[in-house]
């Protein structure tokens, strides 16, 4: 049985989508037959869980094969400072985690395949001769030093996984060998969407009106995700009921005054992963209102919400950006101009007032089987086996 170690500088558990992605990726590799261990950052002020099974239960990972999990110590004083002063402590935390995770791999998993989300950890490993190191890249850094480290890690790795076509293209432009690259978008956990309630039942569970046109946004509230534009668009279309399920507590609080002014926006805050499917089941429309900057939004992101919409066949209004076009075809979503609340409002009204929804839903649902985490894990394990030699 293949031994696979995943390295991710993620707080586990947390309210961030990154941690959900890490948990579901790790679980999918275990289900695919790899003996999987997740190394994550042991951060301060993290909610306690009793054991590994409790962690996987938190992320709604279904029963069955589950990874081993280990928290790796790091220097962590990020949250002791205000956000504007967190750059230096964040870099210290990243570097200390990468060094310590690489040491754990060398000491305890010398013969394992390693898939690292962290370029610094991958660089440590390839410089120390760990032969089966793979790097998963979610964004291309802008600084000269980190780009140099990225190229060093890519050159020494057995292969590089790009989370999107935009990441792949920018890596190739930097000089990474295209033959060493594969694109693996994010996905969804099929078991979470296997037994959905009807729309009427989901709305009763969430106390939503049965006769309203309900638009649901699930996910984080970072500025580049454009949820402030969604709130502004909602204010222009009072006939819609907009529900936002997700976000860190502080970000929800910052958005609440605008939502209250709009009058038709409900902020439900962070939801456990198993409840996200309930929100999608209750919706008429989904929305991905990303802004055109920075590059993480326009070119690099592979939003979980796109794939979860596929799972339920939920029609989507999305910003017309390369990151969205990388996943969705012209006839699989309604694309609207980014950074434009008026265009977003018009797009939502168009889908709410006509009948292309059924066609979009059918096309998205047909794509769903290829977008599961399990399908992704099987593709990646086959690719790694071919690269590992």
Image (cartoon, rainbow, N blue to C red):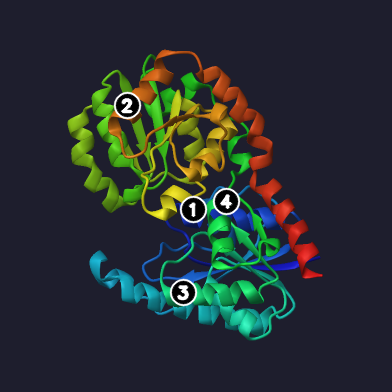
Looking at the image, is mark 1 or mark 4 earlier in the sequence? 4
Residue at image point 27% right, 72% down: 80
Looking at the image, is mark 4 or mark 3 earlier in the sequence? 3
Q: Which residue is mark 1?
A: 300
Residue 225 x %, y %: 37, 46
In-image side of 277 versus 14 (left or right):
right
Q: Indicate which disc residue 345 carries.
A: 2
Q: For the residues marked 1 and 4, what is the alpha-carbon distance in whole angstroms?
A: 7 Å
| Quadrant of the frame with the C terminus | bottom right
- The residue mark sitting in front, 4 or 2, is 4
Callout 4: helix, strand or loop?
A: helix
Within 10 Å of disc 4 (Cα), the crowding (few <14, some 14-19, many 20+) is many
Q: For the residues marked 4 and 2, what is the alpha-carbon distance in whole angstroms?
A: 28 Å
Q: For the residues marked 4 and 3, what is the alpha-carbon distance in whole angstroms?
A: 20 Å
Callout 2: helix, strand or loop?
A: helix
Q: Indicate which disc residue 165 carries.
A: 4
Residue 21 x %, y %: 54, 53
Within 10 Å of disc 2 (Cα), the crowding (few <14, some 14-19, many 20+) is many
Q: For the residues marked 2 and 1, what is the alpha-carbon distance in whole angstroms?
A: 25 Å
Q: Nearer the viewer, residue 348 or 6?
A: 348
Q: Nearer the viewer, residue 362 or 216?
A: 362
Confirm or deny contact between disc 4 and disc 2 (CB under 8 A): no
In this picture, is 299 found above or below 103?
above
Residue at image point 33% right, 41% down: 227
Looking at the image, is mark 3 or mark 1 earlier in the sequence? 3
Q: Indicate which disc residue 146 carries.
A: 3
């Amino acid at each position: 049985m293949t031994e696979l170690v995943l390295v991710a500088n993620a707080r586990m558990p947390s309210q961030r989508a990154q941690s959900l992605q890490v948990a579901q990726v790790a679980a999918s590799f275990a289900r695919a037959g790899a003996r999987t261990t997740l190394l994550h950052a042991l951060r301060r002020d993290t909610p306690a869980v009793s054991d590994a099974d409790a962690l996987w239960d938190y992320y709604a990972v279904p029963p069955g094969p589950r990874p081993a999990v280990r928290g790796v110590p790091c220097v962590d004083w990020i949250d002791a400072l205000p956000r504007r002063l967190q750059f230096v402590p964040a870099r210290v935390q990243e570097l200390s985690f990468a060094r310590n995770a690489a040491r754990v791999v060398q000491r305890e998993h010398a013969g394992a395949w390693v898939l690292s989300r962290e370029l610094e950890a991958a660089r440590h490993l390839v410089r120390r001769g760990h032969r089966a190191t793979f790097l998963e890249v979610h964004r291309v850094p802008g600084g000269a030093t980190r780009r140099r480290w990225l190229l060093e890690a890519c050159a020494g790795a057995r292969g590089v996984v790009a989370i999107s076509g935009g990441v792949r293209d920018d890596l190739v432009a930097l000089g990474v060998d295209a033959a060493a690259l594969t694109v693996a978008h994010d996905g969804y956990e099929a078991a979470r969407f296997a037994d959905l309630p009807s729309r009427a039942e989901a709305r009763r569970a969430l106390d939503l009106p049965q006769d309203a046109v309900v638009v649901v946004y699930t996910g984080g509230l970072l500025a580049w995700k454009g949820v402030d534009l969604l709130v502004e668009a909602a204010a222009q279309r009072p006939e819609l009921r907009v529900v936002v399920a997700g976000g860190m507590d502080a970000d929800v609080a910052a958005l609440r005054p605008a939502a209250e002014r709009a009058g038709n926006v409900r902020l439900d805050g962070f939801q456990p992963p198993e409840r996200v499917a309930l929100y999608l089941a209750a919706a008429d429309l989904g929305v991905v209102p990303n802004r055109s900057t920075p590059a993480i939004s326009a070119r690099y992101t592979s939003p979980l919400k796109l794939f979860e919409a596929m799972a339920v066949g939920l029609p989507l209004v999305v910003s017309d950006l390369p990151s969205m076009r990388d996943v969705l075809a012209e006839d699989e979503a309604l694309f609207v101009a980014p950074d434009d609340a008026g265009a977003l409002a018009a797009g939502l009204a168009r889908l709410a007032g006509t009948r292309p929804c059924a066609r979009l839903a059918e096309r998205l649902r047909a794509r769903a089987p290829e977008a599961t985490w399990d399908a992704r894990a099987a593709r990646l394990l086959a690719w790694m086996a071919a690269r590992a030699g």
